[in-house]
Image (spheres, rainbow, N blue to C red):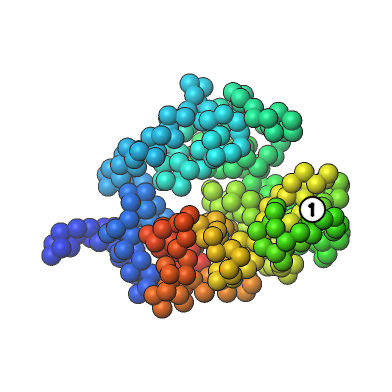
Amino acid sequence: MRPCYNHHIGKLLYTKCGESMEKQKLIDMILTTGTPSHRYIIMRDVLGLDIKCSEMLALQEQILQHKDVKKLLKKQNEDGWFGLGLHGGASMDGIVIALRRAGVEAYHPFMKNAKQAVLSDKIPFLQKAEKKAGWPPVESYCHPRVLVLAALYDNDENDTLLIKFQDELLQKFEQSLHIESLDEISRELTTKRFTQTSGWKWHPNTVARVYFKDKVDSFPWPSDLETLASCLNWKNERTIDTTTQAMYHVSGFSPVPLLFFPPQIGPYGSYEMLDYSFDDPHLRRFTAWRLWNYLNLCKVCDVKEIPHYYQNVIWLKEHLEKGTLAEQLTTPDINEIDIYFMLLLILHYANL
């Protein structure tokens, strides 16, 4: 993908053969009015520009100078660790994911140092919950740690462990195809805490179950989609087929209950942001979360082959074409330009 210069309006324009009119309008909008992070990610992921070309390097420098990015970078310790613990907004996974979502690349020395810190497994400070529960050793699968390693993938010798964990995730997706009923892996929770219509759940129609002890984490979760979507080095025709079949199978359980770890210490993930329509009033306030979930799904699967989820992607496209998308989705957690930015990425990965 190469930029072409328009001498009449004096700026770089990017075009891609086969783009729909609406999608091209979104590209033009983001490149004209988006932030440096918006423009960088669209030019990299949608238009395919080389991240080492001069224009992209200049944008990368602008991203690094943004006040929010600089604030996050100041949270890095001398040993490379970001923040305090392993999991949470002010900890390693939250900070690294925020940097990557801003467009900060994994090739920077400070990002490589963060990867080394994760692999050394020397957390500088454990939060109370982390001290109580403990984390598995670095050689064992642990979602926050694997998520960070995926976000920091740079195709070097330190990515071996990540590839092992990605293979384990793909095996989990494949094995989930043999689950014919959630009764095989879990039981229903019927106490008042789990049958109330508020509290731990976001949608009143969500029910709760708990894993059997020998079946813990045997079901694919949106958190697994996030991990796979954070680094697409694993994707090929066979693995896309695996994830698509698995998610088609998962959609047959919809609305998917929340599955708790025994002894009911907390849910491992929620399909609520994927299962319900975008005009559902109970989930209106979670627009940003929902769009990220759909972006992850579209990165990982061929969403066109999964009608239950694809209908929501079509809903987004149709409301874009009607000019009512921002009105339908704008909430305190996301503004109009971010909605269009997210939608463009969703349409791109959904091949629409």
- State the image coordinates of residue 144 (x, y, percent, origin top left): 62, 40
- Quarter the N terminus occupies: bottom left
Q: Quadrant of residue 89 in the image?
A: top right
Q: Is residue 329 above or below residue 3?
A: below
Nearer-the-camera pick, 287 or 145: 287
Q: Quadrant of residue 342 in the image?
A: bottom left
Which residue is outermost to the left? 8
Q: Quadrant of residue 195 in the image?
A: bottom right
- State the image coordinates of residue 106 (x, y, percent, origin top left): 45, 39
Nearer-the-camera pick, 345 or 65: 65
In the picture, measured across the screen, residue 90 lies left or right of residue 337, that is right
Quickly name the residue at label 1: 193
Say how many tags the image has.
Answer: 1
Residue at image position (39%, 40%) is 68
Residue at image position (82%, 51%) is 211
Q: Is residue 337 above or below residue 144?
A: below
- State the image coordinates of residue 24 (x, y, percent, origin top left): 34, 69
Residue at image position (45%, 63%) is 330
Q: Is residue 219 visible?
A: yes
| SS under mark 1 | helix
Q: What residue type is disc 1 on? A: Arg
Residue neighbourhood size for the residue with mark 1, other residues' Cα within 10 Å, grouped as few (<14), some (14–19), many (≥20): few
Nearer-the-camera pick, 231 or 68: 68
In the picture, measured across the screen, residue 98 lies left or right of residue 18, that is right
- State the image coordinates of residue 91 (x, y, percent, origin top left): 56, 34
Residue at image position (82%, 61%) is 182
In the picture, measured across the screen, residue 231 lies left or right of residue 340, that is right
Q: Is residue 244 visible?
A: no
